[in-house]
Image (cartoon, rainbow, N blue to C red):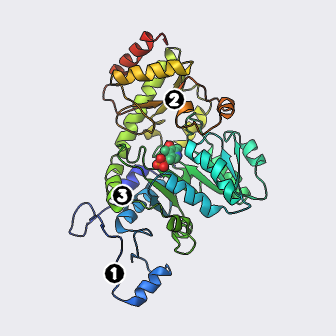
Amino acid sequence: MKDFNPADKIQDLQYFGEFGGVNPSISDSSTYTFLSAKTMFDTFEGNMEGCYLYSRHSSPSNLYLDQALAAMEGTETANVSASGMGAITPTLLQLCGAGDHIVSSRTIYGGTYAFLKNFTPRFGIETSFVDVTKLDIVEAAITPKTKVIYCETVSNPLLEVADIAGLAKIAKKHNLKLVVDNTFSPLSVSPAKLGADIVIHSLTKYINGSSDTVGGVTCGSKEFINSLKNVNSGASMLLGPTMDSLRSASVMKNLRTLHIRIKQHSHNAHFLADQFEADGLKTVYPGLKSHPSHELYKTMINPEYGFGGMMTIDVGTLEKANELMELMQSRNLGYLAVSLGFYKTLFSAPGTSTSSEIPLEEQAEMGLTDGLIRFSIGLDNDIQRTYEMMKACMVELGIL
Ligand SMILES: *Cc1c(COP(=O)(O)O)cnc(C)c1O
């Protein structure tokens, strides 16, 4: 991937706005006029590039953000949506119908898990959940009905790493689409460059980075994105999870500082993970040598962006986890909140929050323990100071 740097691709986009502005004008219209009736017909048929129809289909502001995110992921094009789930659900419904089968990682975002486990069976789509770090198990789960392999680059909340190049080979061999949710590792990993067919993000997290909106994107080939937006048969067009133009303009402005933020998130998380592991806490971070996929992940990342801002520690019991999170919040070390990618540290106990959709027995089986705390480490300027304050909380509660 040495020839591909996602932040350079974002930097290299050039804008001359409607009035010469350095930011494109925000398109504040739901509908668009045509000077001739024939052009309107051709646009409906999907034959007119550069003409807009109706903003559920596309808008100039959304297309700017589509282009920027496609450039970042190195795909032909992209389609932004109102939320991450608004990208994931139409993508999977576009690829699969009644009688089809999905092989999915078992450690995925709780909402995606609930969608595949509880919702898509209503439409005759069945999913097998497997340990995606074991390529032989993934391949063994494929049936003649399988259409999709689904995973997250770095999984939520256990931070397992998917071997995307290995999965892509299996997908090609069986003529399946590999769909990768790259929400935890923007810039660090470029899944399409490793062979993924479709790359999804929840923009809500690192890409927007200010916890002030939800948003999503599907990045892929022109053929697939056009099928999602097809006025007669496209799941995005027909289900309607459209991002608002005002919002896409603000997300795009935040995207421009993503590389600076990711480096700081990674630096801070790596520092804390090193310290907490040395202190004897059970710490999971892909940048630690003790992480089972550390060597693999090293070969996957664009190294300058590091191993990301997410880490977990296990403090033994849910009671201790709750006490620690409440104390850390009262000391202003961050917020007891779900989500990730904010400038302040966010922490939550996944078993009782973001992964509570996963039944308790299954949580235990996948190693999602009660005392687990998931951290999205913030942009703290002095991480040594943060470490000392966090450690003081742990000592006070008898965790260290
Ligand atoms: C948050 C998240 C989603 C869902 O995104 P929303 O914007 O909340 O709809 C999907 N996948 C991952 C990995 C997430 O963290």
Q: Which mark is residue 248?
A: 3
Q: Decide which of 300, 149 is in the foreground and name it.
A: 149
Q: Amino acid at mark 1?
A: Thr
Image spot of residue 90 (x, y percent):
56, 60
Q: Secondary structure at mark 3?
A: helix
Q: CA distance from mark 3 to mark 1?
A: 22 Å
Q: Residues within 10 Å of mark 2 (few under 14, many from 20)?
A: many
Circle 2 or circle 3, nearest the eye: 2
Q: Which residue is mark 1?
A: 33
Q: How many marks?
A: 3
**In front: 324, or 194?**
324
**Front label number (3 vs 1):** 1
State how far apart marks 2 and 3 are (Cα): 31 Å
Q: Amino acid at mark 3?
A: Ser
Left/right placement of residue 181 relative to residue 36 reads right
Disc 2 is placed on an element classified as: loop
Relative to 295, say whether 175 is above or below.
below
